[in-house]
Amino acid sequence: MLTGDKLETAKSIAHSSGICRVGSITFAIEEAIKERIEKYFKFFAARITYAEHTDIFSLFVTGEVLSVIFHEKKLKKQVCTYVVFYNSIIL
């Protein structure tokens, strides 16, 4: 889902519309700093690796974070590797 809204508004829209399901495990990245984004995705990757097959994941990112991801080749590849494990991605 792409909203163009602030992160908290996007979360509210995602929950009220049912895109982000009740009980889902949510991750949010707000800091548009390459090194922080890399650390977040390493943590997310570890969490997803050891998840139950019934776990539902949602990812929230700001536009600034998305910009950093797509301007860094290595980071873009890392993100694209794990993005398939999310049931919903809210931008």
Image (cartoon, rainbow, N blue to C red):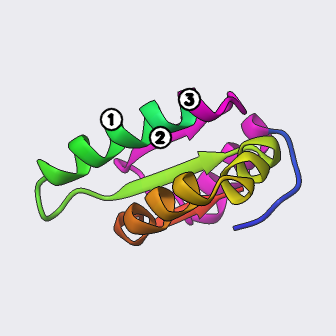
Q: How crowded is mark 1: few (under 14 residues within 10 Å), some or many (20 or more)?
A: few
Whether residue 7 sits left or right of residue 20 in the image: it is right
Q: Where is residue 23 in the image (x, y as percent from the top left)?
A: 34, 47
The residue at the point 22 percent across, 42 percent down is: 46
Report whether residue 87 is seen.
Answer: no
Is residue 35 a member of the stretch shown in magenta? yes
The residue at the point 49 percent across, 38 percent down is: 38
Q: Which of marks 1 and 2 is in front?
A: 1
Q: Where is residue 61 in the image (x, y as percent from the top left)?
A: 66, 46
Residue sitting nearer the eye, 13 or 78: 78
Q: Which of marks 2 and 3 is nearer the N terminus?
A: 2
User: Which residue position is annotated with label 3?
Assistant: 35
The residue at the point 13 percent across, 64 percent down is: 53
Q: Which of marks 1 and 2 is nearer the N terminus?
A: 2
Q: How crowded is mark 2: few (under 14 residues within 10 Å), some or many (20 or more)?
A: some
Whether residue 7 sits left or right of residue 46 in the image: it is right
Real-space Cα distance between discs 1 and 2? Answer: 10 Å
The residue at the far front in this view is 73
Residue 62: name its quadrant. Answer: top right
Label 3: state its secondary structure.
helix
The residue at the far bottom in this view is 84
Could you tell me which quadrant the N terminus lies in?
A: bottom right
Residue 27 is marked as 2
User: Which residue position is annotated with label 1?
Assistant: 43
Could you tell me which quadrant the C terminus lies in?
A: bottom right
